[in-house]
Image (cartoon, rainbow, N blue to C red):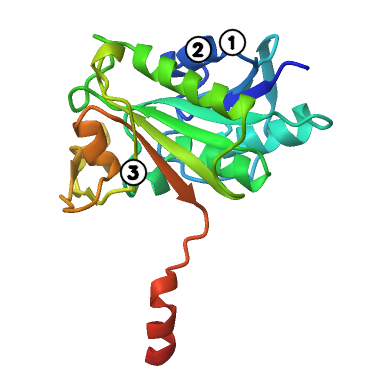
């Protein structure tokens, strides 16, 4: 049987430690191709670049950066240009530096890479490493837990099957723990993030006002009787959330019809 093939991307850029850690973790179990943005594209959402040309820049065998492309661009063009004949067996986006939980999924370029893959008919996972402290880099435990758990999921998919129907992906968030302290996987729903409206106001040397959007604290609404991604990570579990691209609020269709 031919070796399986995994395509990976991210939104932190091609030099990200998280991306390189993911590549390292997957190399023993599959052939890995990397197509990543040239620069950081955090919070770029599911955006395609339509107003300027994009260029693949090959750095080494099976490793490309896409000149000023988004994660969506990376997957869209990789599947249509690098994988014309044989599509990859799996797409993994990450390892993102920081969480992607709750409504942050809609902002996330990491999640968007997985979204684009499942739109193109390829099973996909988005994986993010939660910070130990707000705004701090990942240092003490590195990516050991993320590497181990994403390799486990990838092997399970490649040797068996993907557990979700079409146009759905797995959103995985890793707690900031060493592997031996993790309590395992927990299947969750996306929680509800608490958002601030912090934006710093500055002035350039000519006096013109500009704004810098701040990084909000990681807070969430407590939910009794449910296990959300926030709660699972807080309790020491790897959160794994099935995400669908159909955003229709089905429970409101009848009420909306009556309202009209």
Disc nearest the viewer among 2 and 3 = 3
Mark 2 and mark 3 residues within 8 Å of each other at the beta carbon: no
Query: How far apart, in angstroms, are the residues tagged by discs 2 and 3?
Result: 24 Å
Q: Which mark is residue 203?
A: none
Q: Secondary structure at mark 1?
A: loop
Q: Badge 2: few (under 14), some or many (20 or more) residues near its Cα, within 10 Å? A: many
Q: Nearer the viewer, residue 101 or 15?
A: 101
Q: Which residue is mark 1?
A: 27
* Local crowd size for mark 3, using a 10 Å CA cut-off: few (<14), some (14–19), many (≥20): many
For mark 2, give the secondary structure. helix
Write down the residue under mark 3. Answer: 188
Residue sitting at 35 percent across and 16 percent down? 145
Look at the numbered disc 3 and give the secondary structure of its residue.
loop
The answer to whether any part of residue 67 appears in the image is no
Q: Is residue 63 above or below residue 116?
A: above
Of tags 3 and 1, the one toward the viewer is 3
- Which quarter of the picture shows residue 163? top right
Distance between the alpha carbons at the discs numbered 2 and 1: 6 Å
Which of the two residues, 9 or 211, is positioned nearer the viewer here? 9
Quarter of the rendering containing residue 83 = top right
Determine the residue positioned at 55% across, 15% down. Answer: 26
Q: Are marks 2 and 1 in contact (CB under 8 Å)?
A: yes
Viewer-proximal residue among 192 and 183: 183
């Amino acid at each position: 049987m031919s070796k399986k093939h995994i395509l990976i991307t991210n939104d932190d850029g091609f030099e990200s430690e998280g991306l390189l850690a993911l590549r390292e973790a997957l190399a023993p179990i599959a052939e890995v191709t990397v197509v990543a943005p040239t620069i950081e594209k955090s919070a770029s959402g599911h955006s395609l670049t339509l107003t300027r040309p994009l260029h693949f820049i090959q750095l080494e065998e099976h490793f490309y950066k896409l000149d000023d492309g988004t994660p969506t661009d990376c997957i869209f063009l990789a599947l249509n240009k690098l994988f014309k004949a044989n599509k990859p067996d799996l797409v993994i986006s990450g390892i993102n530096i920081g969480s992607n939980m709750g409504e942050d999924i809609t902002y996330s370029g990491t999640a968007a890479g997985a979204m684009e893959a499942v739109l193109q008919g390829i099973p996909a996972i988005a994986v993010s490493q939660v910070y130990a402290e707000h705004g701090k880099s990942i240092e003490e435990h590195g990516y050991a837990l993320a590497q181990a758990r994403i390799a486990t999921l990838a092997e399970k998919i490649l040797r068996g099957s993907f557990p979700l129907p079409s146009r759905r992906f797995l959103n995985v968030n890793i707690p900031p723990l060493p592997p031996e302290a993790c309590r395992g996987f927990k299947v969750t729903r996306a929680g509800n993030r608490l958002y601030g409206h912090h934006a710093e106001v500055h002035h350039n040397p000519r006096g013109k006002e500009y704004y810098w959007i701040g990084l909000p604290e990681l807070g969430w609404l407590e939910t009794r009787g449910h296990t959300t991604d926030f709660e699972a990570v807080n309790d020491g579990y790897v959160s794994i959330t099935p995400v669908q691209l159909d955003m229709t609020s089905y429970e409101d269709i009848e009420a909306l019809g009556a309202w009209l």
